[in-house]
Image (spheres, rainbow, N blue to C red):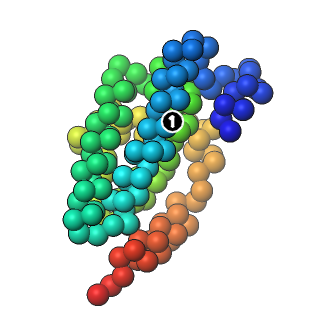
Amino acid sequence: ILEYIDETWKQNPILPQDPLHRARERFWAKFSDEKLLPSVWGAFTKQGKDREEAMAATMENLKFVEEELKGKKFFSGEKIGLVDLVFGWLGNLISIFEEVSGFNIVGEGYPLLSAWMQEFSELPVIKDTWPPRDKMIIKYQALYDKYHPAK
């Protein structure tokens, strides 16, 4: 969908023009979908040893994301691009997952990612479209309770 938007509304490009940079952005989109999101979701929903493994995978995946942000305000440089939009869920959901689960997922070990999450989340084009936080907390608390029933 983001590539369609990029090709249709050319006045605000999401992807870079350079084919190598475009491929890099596609790599990170795939990384988010296939590595990062599943590991974070596993850390949120699983229990015991499975949760520990998911948290370890999450921490390892976040190291790669942190490294990619070195020397940059956004993943694409000084303005948001495809990778920022693909990782955008981090800026909204991570703090909700942390609040609901009591786990610290993105903390002191990821200062660049933390700064990016704050910067990205404060952009008016992003901030004005987030769902209400209180409703998200209710939704994810119900999901968390489903996966972690009281004993």
In this rendering, the answer to whether 74 lies above or below 120 is above
The three-letter code of the residue at mark 1 reads Ala
Residue under the image location 77 percent in, 27 percent down = 8
**Which residue is at 33% across, 85% downward?**
150
Q: Residue at x 46, y 27 (%)?
A: 75
Confirm whether residue 86 shows in the render.
Answer: yes
Callout 1 crowding tier (Cα within 10 Å): few <14, some 14–19, many ≥20: some
x, y (%) of residue 97?
40, 60
Where is residue 12 drawn, in percent x and y?
69, 23
On-image quarter of the C terminus? bottom left
In the displayed image of the protein, which residue is found farthest to the top? 18
- Residue 117 in percent (x, y) is at 43, 40
Image quarter in which the N terminus is found: top right
Compared across the picture, whether 51 is left or right of 7 comes to left
Task: Judge whether 20 appears above or below 15 on screen.
Answer: above
Q: Secondary structure at mark 1?
A: helix
Residue 120 seen in the current view: no
What's the residue at 33%, 67% (across, down)?
Answer: 46
Which residue, given by chain and number where applicable, does mark 1 sit on? 29
Number of marks in the rendered image:
1
Residue at the bottom extreme, as displayed: 151
Relative to 127, 31 lies left or right = left
Quadrant housing residue 4 = top right
From the viewer's side, name the closer residue of 102 and 40: 40
Q: Is the residue 111 above or below the residue 94 in the image?
A: above
Q: Nearer the viewer, residue 22 or 96?
A: 22
Q: Is residue 143 left or right of residue 15?
A: left
Q: Position of residue 25 (x, y in %)?
A: 51, 26
Farthest residue in the right direction? Answer: 8
